[in-house]
Amino acid sequence: QVQLVESGGGVVQPGRSLRLSCVASGLTFRNYGMHWVRQAPGKGLEWVAIIWYDGSNKYYADSVKGRFTISKDNSKNTLYLQMDSLRVEDTAMYFCTTSRGSSWYKDHWGQGTLVTVSS
Amino acid sequence: QSALTQPPSASASPGQSVTISCTGTSSDFGAYNYVSWYQQHPGKAPKLIIYEVNKRPSGVPDRFSGSKSGNTASLTVSGLQAEDEADYYCSSNAGSNNVLFGGGTKLTVL
């Protein structure tokens, strides 16, 4: 079955950087677009970014544009999120998900990795 | 674009039906049927239960159904069961290279 496993979360000071990873198994990763979605403690879901199956297109939420970079390495079945200039408001659980079809629905989710931005 | 609007809470008794609304603007939904719904139990990852307005992934009970009229999408849960108690989120991709989520609805099974 499809499994997505995120890692790389932790506690970081404002202004610093962090890179999240998401290792996929049970699917042909190179055929899948992927999203990052986050959830602040006690809050709702917020879309962060999407990358096309081949990495040719990337789109970001306005809240992270210019600070976060999504990428994927199809040879390693791994999705990344490089997070620079972190802010307190970036504190959240970060989930990676698959992206399907033109509607970009998210049919598989990882369990998430927690990022805490605090001084 | 702001988040889609959902009621913060909904409740019904076991066996009854409940409908959760998700309201946006015409630009939030566009001309596409790109509405999906996710169920999230406490401490767990969200799970896809409806995609493209009214399609159910394999394994999701047919007690869950979706619809859309104008700028409002709806999720109906029929024959409520205790395990349906969870948070529910709607989502839309209006073809604008952006994804919107609703604020979430906490469903309580009385």
Image (spheres, rainbow, N blue to C red):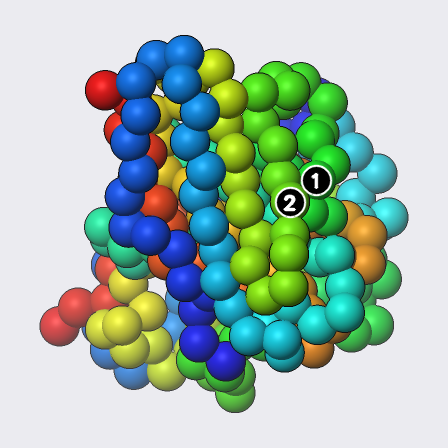
Instruction: Find residue B41 and report its horizontal and vertical position in percent.
Output: 36, 30
Q: Which amino acid does label 1 sit on?
A: Asn
Residue at 28 percent across and 63 percent down: it is A91
Left or right: A106 with respect to A6? Answer: right
- Categorize mark 1 by other alpha carbons within 10 Å: few (<14), some (14-19), many (20+): many
* Residue A117 visible, this orientation: yes
Q: Mark 1 points at which residue?
A: B54
Tag 2: Cα neighbours inside 10 Å, few (<14), some, or many (≥20)? some
User: Residue at point 36% right, 38% down?
Assistant: B87
In the picture provided, is A110 more to the left or to the right than A104? Answer: left
**SS of the residue under disc 1:** loop
Instruction: Give the amino acid at mark 2.
Output: Ser
**Of residues A119 and B7, the one drawn nearer to the viewer in this rendering:** B7
Closest to the observer: A101 or A30? Answer: A101
Q: Which x, y percent locates residue B57?
A: 71, 29
Residue that carries the numbered disc 2 in the rendered image? B67
**Which mark is first along the chain, 2 or 1?**
1
For the residues carrying marks 1 and 2, which lies nearer the camera in this image?
2
What residue is rendered at 55% in x and 75% in y? B25
Q: Quadrant of the C terminus of chain B?
A: top left
